[in-house]
Amino acid sequence: MSSKVKKRTLINDIASHLEVSIATVSLVLNGKAKQSRISDAVAERVLKYVEEVGYKPNHLAKSLRTGKTHVIGLVVEDISNPFFATVAWLIEKQAFERGYRIIYCSTDNDPAKSKELISMFRERHVDGFIIVPSDGIEDEVQNILREQTPTVLFDRFLPGLATNYVVVDGAQGTYKAAQHLLEQGFRNIAFVTTNSVQTQMEARLAGYTKALEERGLAPKVKRVVASKNAEPLIAELHAFIQENRDSCDAIIFSTNYLSIYGLEAINRLQLQIPADIAVVSYDDHDLFRLYTPAITVIAQPIESIAKNVIDILLEQLQQPNDHAMVNDNRIVLPTALVVRKSSVKQQE
Amino acid sequence: MSSKVKKRTLINDIASHLEVSIATVSLVLNGKAKQSRISDAVAERVLKYVEEVGYKPNHLAKSLRTGKTHVIGLVVEDISNPFFATVAWLIEKQAFERGYRIIYCSTDNDPAKSKELISMFRERHVDGFIIVPSDGIEDEVQNILREQTPTVLFDRFLPGLATNYVVVDGAQGTYKAAQHLLEQGFRNIAFVTTNSVQTQMEARLAGYTKALEERGLAPKVKRVVASKNAEPLIAELHAFIQENRDSCDAIIFSTNYLSIYGLEAINRLQLQIPADIAVVSYDDHDLFRLYTPAITVIAQPIESIAKNVIDILLEQLQQPNDHAMVNDNRIVLPTALVVRKSSVKQQE
DNA sequence: GTGAAAGCGCTAACAG
DNA sequence: CTGTTAGCGCTTTCAC
């Protein structure tokens, strides 16, 4: 036989050393000493010895038995995007403190990958889901819900599905941004967005359109194909900006990565910001603070998003099993316009 | 009783439906049909039915039984740093294809947090470790090794500990960078680094020092306290650059985040790069490509690091249990100097 | 070739 | 108040 080197302490070892039953140990460890009327003396001895030998229950066995893993699956669009990375980090911190672990994965906004990840998380028996839904995963989310697994969506929601969600009022964000540019005297404001019809993107577009139409100005919208492939996107934006050089004095980008590609394109065209063209980005980024000139952004309330998401989820997680789940937490948070130099008209 | 809604298919269900024993099903599913001389006909029926009902074995039960979780613990310094994020992503992709899952956590280079995370991963029964070691965790790593858990360190190693590791030849990187600056005609090259004495930081410093001393020039080293708190660091660098304004015409930063803070400081001092001061950063970053001017960097071979790490780990993971582990894979990879405008002397 | 059965380590009735 | 015991779902030996 192989020489077993590992010698983890088991609940058995504890019980026999202390000459009590393993049930007693288990009960004490799970805080059920009182309700099982175990003497304080015994409880204390158990706790002390457990501490002494550094006994840790085997999570696998525990989960197999209880059906609870204390793990939450976090499905985001792209964990390398600072927005999602920060939200994920905040959620993880909060969850950790309350005894939950997070496992995350990125979908790259691909429905197939989203489905695969959700299914993987289900296999792993996560206790709850936090999802940034891509299009076309209504059925999967529906399934999770039917299984009574607590779930919260964020950043966007799935219209027609009764779920909890936490989103941001993107329309109000782009509306304020457009108004700000108008006040600064820019008149030909373009809006660069993706071809996505997801709720959050449509809202951002709507806010922009509304602001322009209120002033009787015609919106100019450029939609690009969402992709992580930088060069073609930069080229496309380069072409767009070049073509509209004379008919466009400001651009609002609907996501931080579009802005970054846009800045690269503007750079290559050797245009000056904001003299030749003003820029506002939806969503903040380190780069925008550091860029010369600093870029005006529509900032999302990251802390608040994370806090709301985890609060809703944990509340449902703590619900007793037979309690019917209600998924009617719909939170909409405001954005903040952070004005920097890229959108402020210079004195001539 | 609570109304059990969930109805996962179990191996039992498969067996009874097919009127074979659960052992047969298990054997077939684990590819041991042949060696258990199960008829092809039966094997096929099993596989077909399993496919049909979409049966997935319960990982928890499987792991509890086999002692293998097929999960790898990845402990990095800071997952929000693009270098670590990219390596992690590549590792995850590779591991996934070979049936392993990754769980990651950041240590922020804090020994206490590192220890906690390693212990958490052990509790979770990870099959292997990939660690970016902070100082002072020699004992924990020693423990993992003693338990025969496959482990690979990267980015740096723990001197005096016989472990597998994958690192980069940082000394050669900074040496080449310094030489490049000297060739460009810069003579007063400073080196900004942290107060860390970890192997990778010491190597980077050594390469710089060597290049200068070979030319009979005196090194000028600024050490700052490593921290994620931006403002004090920026202020410290601001002060340093200001003080040495006349005695320093180039700076090499030893990490990407130091460079970012440095750029912010240079910005605030309204110095021109490279006219007033040339800049080279160790480690690349999106920001450095996009910055005006683009920043010269010492680039690390990210793909190669990830590939080596995962290859070494998976090889050990596939080793039969009774096979004594040897931890003598020591890989040192070269860096590449990517020259951009920030370090090229302009025509006067 | 196949099936029965013994656990992996833990929890939680239930019976004393 | 404490101990016995029956599983959670799966793998794997060993007897048929």
Image (cartoon, coloured by chain):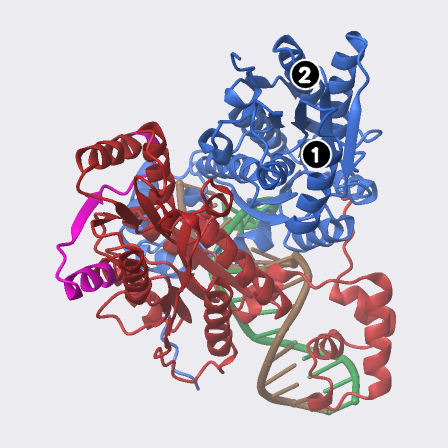
Chain colours: A red, B blue, C brown, D green
What whole-number distance in Å separates the C-alpha atoms at marks 2 and 1? 49 Å
Identified at 65% across, 33% down, the residue is: B255
Dot 1: element: loop
Tag in front: 2 or 1: 2
Residue B276 lies in quadrant: top right
Residue B229 visible (yes or no): no
Identified at 83% across, 67% down, the residue is: A51
Q: Is residue A11 above or below residue B282?
A: below
Q: Using the image, tell me which numbered label, if any, was put on residue B322.
A: 1
- What's the chain of the residue with tag 1? B
Q: Is residue A139 above or below residue A329?
A: above
Identified at 57% across, 19% down, the residue is: B343
Dot 2: element: helix
Please state if C1 lies on the left or on the right of B341 as rendered: left
Identified at 18% across, 49% down, the residue is: A221
Residue nearer the viewer, A282 or A121: A282
